[in-house]
Amino acid sequence: MSRWRAVAPGRVNLIGEHTDYNGLPVLPIAIDRAIRIEFRVTDDAAVRLHSPVERFAPFAFRLRRPIRAANRGDWSTYVRAAARGLLEHGIDLRRGIEGTVSGDVPVASGLSSSSALVVASALALLKANGMGVEDGPGDGGAGRAAAELAPDEDPASERPAAKTVSRLELAALMARAERFAGSRGGGMDQAACLHGVEGHALCIEFEPLRVTPVAVPERWRWVVASSLERAEKSAGARDAYNERARQCREALRGVGGGYRDLVAEPDLDGVLRRARGVLAPALFRRFRHVVTEGRRVALAEGAMRDGDLGRFGELMVQSHASLRDDYEVSTASLDEIVEIALEAGAAGARLTGAGFGGCVVALCEERTAGTVMEALATRFFAPRLGGSPGRDAIFAAKASGGAGVGRAHHK
Ligand code: GLA
């Protein structure tokens, strides 16, 4: 019997935090850690999945509308969201999947394990129903997590997939679908997961969605360190996240215009003066983060293209300060990691993902990455863990290929 595997990477956002839901660009990488679904296709329209991790209980549901929500915090929510998104898009899911979910993307860490699960589920369900995913215009020539997949064939007919959906379409569809989990995310995570390119960052623009890969200079290293605080997207952190999104809309109503035009205005200080005059202090700070972060993304993309490590690092430091002081999504632990990383020689460091816990990403030169990791092990992790941090607490992330589905290699 054919075994299939859907592989979907996590992501680390390098810069452009809390900008996507305001229609402004972001610059993440897909990373070399992924969620994997090993499955076989079933003749009945149902999903049956389990995980080797005990706290993720096995579940099953029918691929028939309406697909009901699971309890808050239940991991099946993300698989249900994918199925629901496909069904609502009019995709007929007559066949189901049965299998195992595993992965090495740390959970609740701001590295998009949840979106990776959504995307992997969608790819598995499409594959089971004879549909493929292909590159469309604007897809940016996405790389694939293909290294671990054998050549792709239709499971039923053994012929190439009859119908296809483009990566961009699927990213947009899954971004909407994931809102089923209650968080009004902006679309960065699903697009990064589907469009990863080895050795490249992804400049993702919205409305309409567009992805442009930007080569990461060879000597740049991304160190990811966990605050050891869980940033649970399906639970606590989501209310604070949704509140920020609401405040951004309210601030914009006060100032007038759209974020994209405001960021493009040559006199940004003038924009900020105007905003300060009409917005209450807290709303003004949220607004200032969004528009200055919007500017920083464009500058950071330029710095990456120029190979200017120092400049890119500075922009990351500014981004973190803005997230800490104006957007108020940092924590004492995240701030401490940023400080230690910078003192140990990182060119830049900032919280990555939504914040409220989760991880920091630090930009290092090849030769300082080890020093930075050691400093964090000694000064941040040892006092808290009483020993060395595990491979989920601190690691070097590589810009990697995007999600894919194919035959599982037989071992
Ligand atoms: C979460 C959301 C993303 C984005 C980030 C913050 O990861 O899913 O869409 O808004 O937070 O930048």
Image: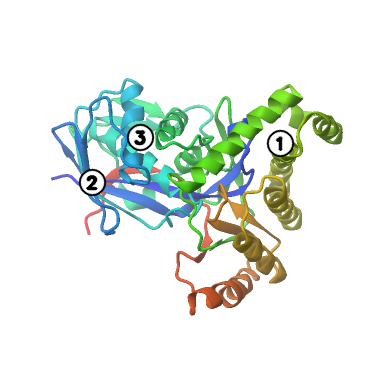
What is the quadrant of the C terminus in the image?
A: bottom left
The answer to whether one can see residue 239 in this image is yes
- The CA span between labels 3 and 2 is 14 Å
Q: Secondary structure at mark 2?
A: strand
Please state the total of marks drawn on the protein image. Answer: 3
Left or right position of 262 against 133: right
* Nearer to the camera, 29 or 80: 80
Residue occupied by mark 2: 49
* Nearer to the camera, 171 or 139: 171
Q: Comparing marks 1 and 2, which lies closer to the viewer?
A: 1
Residue 80 position within the rendered picture, expressed as x and y whole percent measured from the top left = 31, 36
**Measuring 68% from the left and 44% from the top, which residue is drawn there?**
301
Residue occupied by mark 1: 283
**Measuring 58% from the left and 52% from the top, which residue is drawn there?**
352
Q: Is residue 100 above or below residue 123?
A: below
Does mark 1's beta carbon lie closer than 8 Å to ligand 1?
no
Of the image marks 3 and 2, the number of the one nearer the N terminus: 2
Residue occupied by mark 3: 81
**Measuring 51% from the left and 27% from the top, which residue is drawn there?**
137
Q: Is residue 141 above or below residue 53?
A: above
Residue 196 position within the rendered picture, expressed as x and y whole percent measured from the top left = 49, 44
Q: Quadrant of ligand 1?
A: top right
Residue 304 position within the rendered picture, expressed as x and y whole percent measured from the top left = 69, 49
The answer to whether one can see residue 220 in this image is no
